[in-house]
Amino acid sequence: MISRRSLLGAAAAAATIPAISPARADGGQVVVSTWGGDYADLLAVNVEKPILDPKGIEIIHDINSSDARKTKLIAEKMSRRGSMDVVHLSDTDMYQMAKLGVFEDVPAASVPNLAEVLQPLRMPYAIPHIFSAQLLVYNPDKVDQPKSFTDFLDPKYKGRVGIPDLNYSVVTMGMALAAGGSMSNWEPAKKILMDLKKNEPRLYPSHEDLVQGLKSGEIWLAPEWLAREFMWKKSGVNLARVVPTEGAIPVIFQASVPKNAQNKANAWAYLDAMLNAKAQLGFADRMGYGPTVTDATLPLSLEQGIGFTPAEEAKFKTPDYEYQAAQLPAILDFWNKDFKG
Amino acid sequence: MRGGPRVAALALPATVLVCVVMVAPLLLLFRYSLNRYSPTELMVAAFTGANYLAAVTDPYYRSVLASTLWVAGLSTLLTLLLGFPPAYALARMQGRWKSWTTLLVVFPLMVGNVVRAAGWMMLLGNSGVVNTALQATGLFAGSIQLMYTPFAVVLGIVTVVLPYMILTLASVIEGIPRNVEEAAANLGASPARVFRRVVLPLALPGVVAGCALVFILCMNAYSTPVLLGGPRFKMMAPAVYDQFVRTTNWPFGAALAFILLAVTLILTLAGSALLQRRIRA
């Protein structure tokens, strides 16, 4: 295991000191390690100002990337005094960190809104904040509605399938399901991915690059997050989407409290505020991610844009996190060496 | 030398600083490279050379190292060829034009690599300026794949490192007296012969320094190959990053980093020694 001493250097390199205001608020502080940009702005507008400010809690944003946050969690693991009270990560990253035993379990008594959380999204060590799912996204002028991931292999789409390189794990899961595998067996994905390679898919380093490909007609169809499709469509890109017969694979952005957090009571209050129905609706409209609580009702137009029907939700394929954590290095190796190579 | 220890003491703060901020992290990283990786525990303390062995025996990482080497070698050569004429002109320039031109050479360094790569993306993309212009000429109906190619990477890297080469060469060429060239010309040597027999041999120390500096920068390029090379083109620095970040495999990432460091160091020293021998000969 990683010892405190062995990680001292990494801690020094990775730790960034959040800006601390000299005036302490009456309700104390909470240090939130999160993403910048829209996400941090929406947290301020929907969660912090309306819910936590009136309680006198001073919010300190520790803005960084997921990788920096993970490194800090690992580096501070053995420390009694952690630098973060609330940590935001995707479900995959959160599970990997939870396996290292760095998070407290979420106490229902301190987070009353936990009772409203959608059942399939519940985890003992984290609250689900927002979620989306991988679907098939396509240009309706060029492509008849696809049904399955196997449509990517159709010779008529040779060179017209776009793959977001960053999503290698979730694309592998979709292909595994299409080839008779499961969320706990990705092995069949290897053969079907090699078959897909023969159809010359275009790989894009980021989602932003992929949408440029869709916009210019370079590619016609791709596996993508519903939230992305919603935002791109809103900005005028000619797109349609469909839940594949294999089922949609959700991605959940979660929040947890490290065991060595210094302001735990405020951290739980923060997590509770993140689950507030009104706060969740703010995120849905601006980012296209769905609410994770039952009491947040989306307006009809938004529901059509980012919602799932009960039948689609029933077919959600939630990752087998333990299997995923064990397989990810090997599948990335396969992805880099064989699929991309 | 009575002043020796005192002079040595002047170097002490800088030496301590370098040891703390560079040598210590390197030692720590080297220690990590001997650890073992587990997908669930991440890093398990061990003393094994398995990461190094895996990296050098794996054909994938050998090909990544090979592409890093040829991109760095070609970029260094192109930078030298493109950098020598402006460096010569800059060195021979007089008056206020010289300071303005120097500023112009330095100017690209004031813009970050990522921003410059973004500029190339606008130019080289399938709907970018170059392809749009080609389509407007009517010569091409479709688009030429310029982005996500080794060509884009070499082009991007050369423009990043060119100022370093020009400034290094210019500072050495400035030290070559003009009258040496004039004497050669006076004795009947053509301009090409003056360059080959007088300027180039005397500028060789600058060529050595410039090439070493540029080669090291090229070997360690990160943002340009990621942004312009696309997902299929891999160089060593992005491969190291992938290991640290995408799989949290710090031991293997550290081993790759040390292999990159060793190869760069050996080739830079060997190249410099070879050129130095030329100078002495």
Image: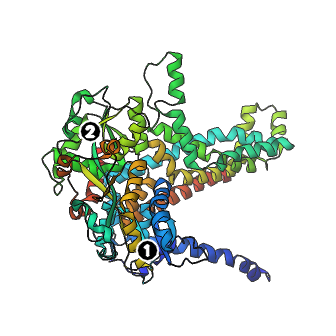
Side of B209 relative to B263 (left or right):
right
Find disc 1 in the rendering and name its residue. Answer: A85
Side of A185 relative to B260 (left or right):
left
Marking on residue B238: none
Q: Residue at x 79, y 48 (%)?
A: B174
Please state which of residues A229 and B56 is positioned toward the viewer in this rendering: A229
Position of the C terminus of chain A by quadrant? top left
Find disc 2 in the rendering and name its residue. Answer: A197
Pinpoint residue A55: horizontal percent, then vertical percent: 48, 73
Q: Chain of mark 2?
A: A
Side of A12 relative to A152 (left or right):
right
Task: Residue at the far top: name it.
Answer: B138
Tell me the distance, in whole angstroms, between the alpha carbons under discs 1 and 2. Answer: 44 Å
Q: Amino acid at mark 1?
A: Asp
Side of B152 relative to A330 (left or right):
right
Q: Residue at x 85, y 34 (%)?
A: B186
Give above or below for B116 relative to A19. above
Pinpoint residue B110: horizontal percent, then vertical percent: 66, 50
> Do badges 1 and 2 share one subunit?
yes
Position of the N terminus of chain A by quadrant? bottom left
Instruction: Say which element carries label 1.
Output: loop
Question: Between tags 1 and 2, which lies in front?
Answer: 1
Say which label, 1 or 2, has the lower sequence index: 1
Q: Residue at x 52, y 75 (%)?
A: B24
The reply to whether residue A225 is in sight is: no
